[in-house]
């Protein structure tokens, strides 16, 4: 399982996507900390997503470092920790996207605005649920192991046995298909209600496409592993879903942060001390 990646292999695009995703999401987090206007219940959900995506990017950065070393230097316990952290933040990212979709529908299409109690409860549930599902492989339902190139750790799909199959289908229903359904339905209802009178104030297409195209290849690979021998696929081809998924934090940051005028303004205030001082004076 501990194969070595070749120089110039997946480590280069992985490190680029990790650095871009980490940079953009750290700027988003800093803008929330330094801009009082962003401290609202709706933006708390975006902050949760930025934290999750920062975790994904950090996980990818560790994998990129081990790819450059052409070995996994952190041992078996490090592999389990890396697998848990990556899986937990990935699930938190997916579920946070669904929570944002539901929160936006609630904010724009109902008479009751999203309040702090509801937003905090959603964030708490997202992270508690993600940690719960990510801990199950550590307890024996599913397991973490080295990815084909041996430079990072994820769910072991090489066996495709009953243990893996039962965990996969249960986990995928609650953490991929259900969040995807919530996201699609929430934005479709927004389009139906707001599209008659005005243009929806947020992008109603990109979030669902990001979930489907960003995490769908992983779902297809895992599904294939339940029906056939996944090791028959070349190691480099098996790494394609991981490389695609590592671009999700960058896409999310561009959509939810840079695509929001208020968050965008907050980021610029963080980057420009003069603008921050002006906003305080005003």
Image (tube, rainbow, N blue to C red):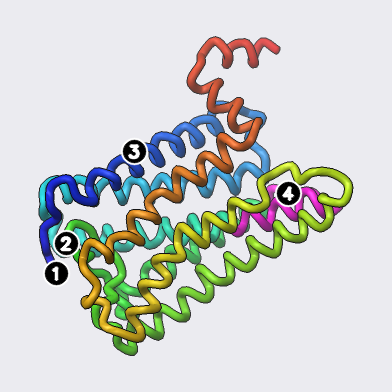
Query: Where is mark 4, residue-wise?
Result: 115
Is the C-beta separation of discs 1 and 2 under 8 Å? yes
The quadrant of the image that shows the C terminus is top right
Which residue has dot 1 on it? 1
User: Is the C-beta separation of discs 2 and 4 under 8 Å?
Assistant: no
Q: Secondary structure at mark 4?
A: loop
The image quarter in which residue 81 lies: bottom left
Range shown magenta = 98-116
The circle on residue 190 is: none
Numbered disc in front, either 1 or 4:
1
Residue at mark 2 to residue at mark 4: CA–CA distance: 45 Å
Q: Is residue 111 magenta?
A: yes
Point 52% across, 59% down: residue: 211
Image disc number at residue 19 = 3
Q: Which residue is farthest right?
A: 197
Label 2 element class: loop
């Amino acid at each position: 399982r501990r194969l070595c990646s070749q120089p110039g292999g997946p480590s280069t695009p992985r490190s680029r996507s990790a650095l871009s995703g980490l940079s953009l999401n750290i700027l988003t987090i800093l803008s929330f900390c330094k801009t009082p206007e962003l401290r609202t219940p709706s933006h708390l959900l975006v902050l949760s997503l930025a934290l999750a995506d920062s975790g994904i990017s950090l996980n990818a950065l560790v994998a990129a470092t081990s790819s450059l070393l052409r070995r996994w230097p952190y041992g078996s316990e490090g592999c389990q920790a890396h697998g848990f952290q990556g899986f937990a933040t990935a699930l938190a990212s997916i579920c946070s996207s669904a929570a944002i979709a539901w929160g936006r529908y609630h904010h724009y299409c109902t008479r009751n605005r999203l309040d702090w109690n509801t937003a905090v409860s959603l964030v708490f549930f997202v992270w508690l649920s993600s940690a719960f599902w990510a801990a199950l492989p550590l307890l024996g339902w599913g397991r973490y192991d080295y990815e084909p190139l041996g430079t990072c750790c994820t769910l072991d799909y090489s066996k495709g046995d009953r243990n893996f199959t039962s965990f996969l289908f249960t986990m995928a229903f609650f953490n991929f298909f259900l969040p995807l359904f919530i996201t699609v339905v929430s934005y479709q209802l927004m389009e139906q209600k707001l599209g008659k009178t005005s243009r929806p104030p947020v992008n109603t297409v990109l979030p669902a496409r990001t979930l489907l195209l960003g995490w769908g290849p992983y779902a297809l690979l895992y599904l294939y592993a339940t029906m056939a021998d996944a090791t028959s696929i070349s190691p480099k081809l098996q790494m394609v879903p991981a490389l695609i998924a590592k671009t999700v934090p960058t896409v999310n940051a561009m959509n939810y942060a840079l695509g929001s005028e208020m968050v965008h303004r907050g980021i610029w205030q963080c980057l420009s001390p003069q603008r921050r001082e002006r906003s305080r004076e005003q």
